[in-house]
Image (cartoon, grey):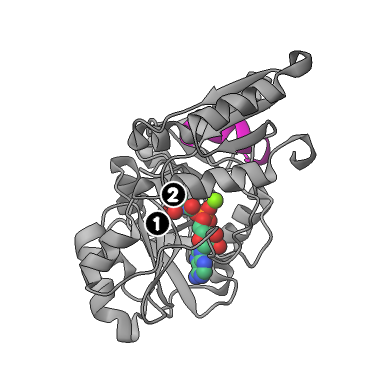
Amino acid sequence: MDTDELLTDDVGRAVACLRAGGLVGMPTETVYGLAADASDPGAVARIYAVKGRPTGHPLIVHAADTDMLDGWVRPGPAEAAFAELARTCWPGPLTVLVGRGPKVPDAVTGGRPTVGVRVPAHPVATALMTGFGAPVAAPSANRFGKVSPTTAAHVLADLGPWLDPARDVVLDGGRASVGVESTIVDLTVDPPQLLRAGAIDAVTIGRLLDVPVAGAAGPSRAAGMLVAHYAPRTEVLLAETPGEARQLVADRSAGGRRVRLLDRTDDLVVAAHELYADLRAADADGLDTLVVVLPPAEGLGHALRDRLLKAAAGSGPAAS
Ligand code: TXA
Ligand code: MG
């Protein structure tokens, strides 16, 4: 099948797909999502089928603005915290977990009483949802357990064979600017907890809410998050220092194995922007091993370490 038929920059065509119960590869500032009408359980069910994701792993509800979430959230005692994060962080790379409103179908949350919501900062996503006039449910637009997509070409490469050009589109919005998935903060517990590290760190959220917010200790813990995730076929080895990385490269290079050293610790914004393209390039270039120098555990470094630890845990030929 020619997956290029799926590709469009026509927002009107994508809105028509959503209205007809189809799926839209949606650009956001973090990674591309695979969007469907959040109020349509049939369309939402196709997201799970196309991703190969086990049902019961909840989806984030995305909206063009906070008003569009009326009836979708019921923050209860977290109302003030929700309003503060919405005011200061949206549109932006933050997902907020709150009580679920009456409009959320069971298909979106796997029956949970909570819902994750986000207003992304991407003009094409905003135009899509404004045109559609209602929220969309969207996970990252990759096959389950694999590397997230930061370009429309990544989405086509991963999901093209599973999408239907008669019903679905991939909306090209250029390259994702942030490059790693949104921060997830759980406001249903007191004090709030970070479930997934992202571009907005725990310290920043704590300052905004005026309470200490624990960073995601160890691997992210949102529902459905596994230790192995974001995994390329290439073996990924991690090093805390450049010296350790060079030693790993030397050890692994025996016998003509193809090994690459990746050190982007000098600029973590660039490291995040390039992360998933770097992991995909390792596979595309047929490497045996990618040795990555870990960034320090501060700011965006938390998110990078989280994704890299998962990439390493699930990497290698056995994982593909
Ligand atoms: O940046 C992002 O968040 C991207 C873009 C497309 O917005 N989306 C994304 O979605 O990363 P996804 O499904 O790949 O990751 C969302 C994570 C999943 O682990 C999911 O299980 C968790 O958030 N999650 C969503 N709703 C939840 C809920 N109600 N309770 C617990 N975990 C939830
Ligand atoms: Mg994902």
Where residue 303 is drawn, which disc sits there?
2
| First in sequence: mark 1 vs mark 2 | 1
Q: Which residues are magenta?
A: 150-165
| Element marked by disc 2 | helix
Can you say which quadrant of the picture contains the N terminus? top right
Q: Would you name the residue on which mark 1 appears?
A: 183
Q: Main secondary structure of the magenta part?
A: helix
Q: Is residue 15 magenta?
A: no
Q: How many marks can you see?
A: 2
Q: Which amino acid does the dot numbered 2 rest on?
A: Ala
> Counting other residues with Cα less than 10 Å from the Cα at mark 1, is it few (<14), some (14-19), or many (20 or more)?
many
Whether residue 127 sits left or right of residue 21 in the image: it is left
Badge 1 vs badge 2, beta-carbon distance below 8 Å? yes
Which residue sits at x=51%, y=50%? 306
Q: In this rendered view, identify the residue nearer to me: 263 or 126.
A: 263
The percent coordinates of residue 85 (x first, y second) are 25, 66
Q: In this rendered view, identify the residue nearer to me: 28 or 296.
A: 296
The percent coordinates of residue 317 (x first, y second) are 77, 34
Q: Which amino acid does the dot numbered 1 rest on?
A: Thr
Where residue 133 sits, quadrant-wise, is bottom left
> Counting other residues with Cα less than 10 Å from the Cα at mark 2, is it few (<14), some (14-19), or many (20 or more)?
many
The percent coordinates of residue 311 (x first, y second) are 61, 42
**Is residue 58 depicted above or below 30 in this figure?**
below
Which residue sits at x=58%, y=77%? 111
